[in-house]
Amino acid sequence: MKSLEIVGFKRANLGKKNAKAVRLDSYVPCVLYGGAEQVHFSVPAILFRELLYTPEVHIVDLNIEGTHYRAIVQDSQFHPVNEMLLHVDFLELEEGKEVKMEIPVKYVGVSPGVLAGGKLVSKLRKIKVKATPENLPDYVEVNIADLALGKSIKVSAVEAKGYTILSSPQAPIATVAIPRALKGTLAADK
């Protein structure tokens, strides 16, 4: 899994007023938990560009005033109107301890349904998995080589390699939709 370094500064004062002051300086208030103690810190907002505004997942190497931690992003909160980043929660990684994370889906193969004129519709972009930090994949491979017109592939068809899939096995990942023009020709052939 890819890693990304983020440098942060500890926050002495906590609370709504101080968090607002931190945001005005274009910093984002953050918290790191899951380890021995909770660490409250702030990070320049620009450093989250490669971490949050991408479909990929990363392990974050946090450098908080010289102390290094390995973590993943557990949650991020955005302003409902102006989409400004308000707060980020990090979960500290420990060797051998399993973590739950949403991993992006990567399609492998060419669908015969798409070749016949259908449209591949993505229903799930990420699948929830549980694994140790060493076994966390960059993406979950989904083979769509057997996907015909009007058919879908479900989570139960995905092979888990070193991790456990927590998403519902009946949830569809992708479907090949039949376009209206193709429906007319299929009905005329019958």
Image (cartoon, grey):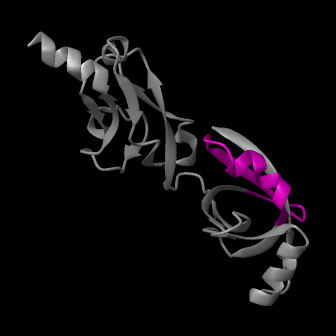
Whether 190 is drawn above or below 69: the answer is above
List x then y, in percent, for residue 135: 52, 40
Measuring 63% from the left and 69% from the top, which residue is drawn there?
Answer: 80
Most extreme residue toward the left, as rendered? 190
Image coords of residue 48 (percent x, y): 77, 54
Q: Which residue is more in the foreground, 121 or 145?
A: 121
Q: Position of residue 105 (x, y in %)?
A: 47, 35
Residue at 83% across, 64% down = 43
In this rendering, the answer to whether 3 lies above or below 141 is: below
Magenta span contains residue 179: no
Which span of residues is magenta-colored? 43-69
Is 87 above or below relative to 120?
Answer: below
The picture places residue 51, in percent across and down from the top left corner, at: 71, 49
Q: How many numbered marks appear?
A: 0
Which quadrant, please, contains the N terminus?
Answer: top right
Relative to 181, is 92 on the left or the right?
right
Quadrant assignment, res 66: bottom right
Q: Quadrant of the C terminus?
A: top left
**What residue lies at 31% left-to-right and 29% top-to-bottom?**
177
Looking at the picture, tell me which residue is in the foreground, 161 or 15.
Answer: 15
Q: Between residue 82 and residue 122, name the one nearer to us.
A: 82
- x 27%, y 38%: residue: 156
**Which quarter of the figure has residue 122?**
top left
Can residue 72 be seen? yes
Residue 15 visible, this angle: no
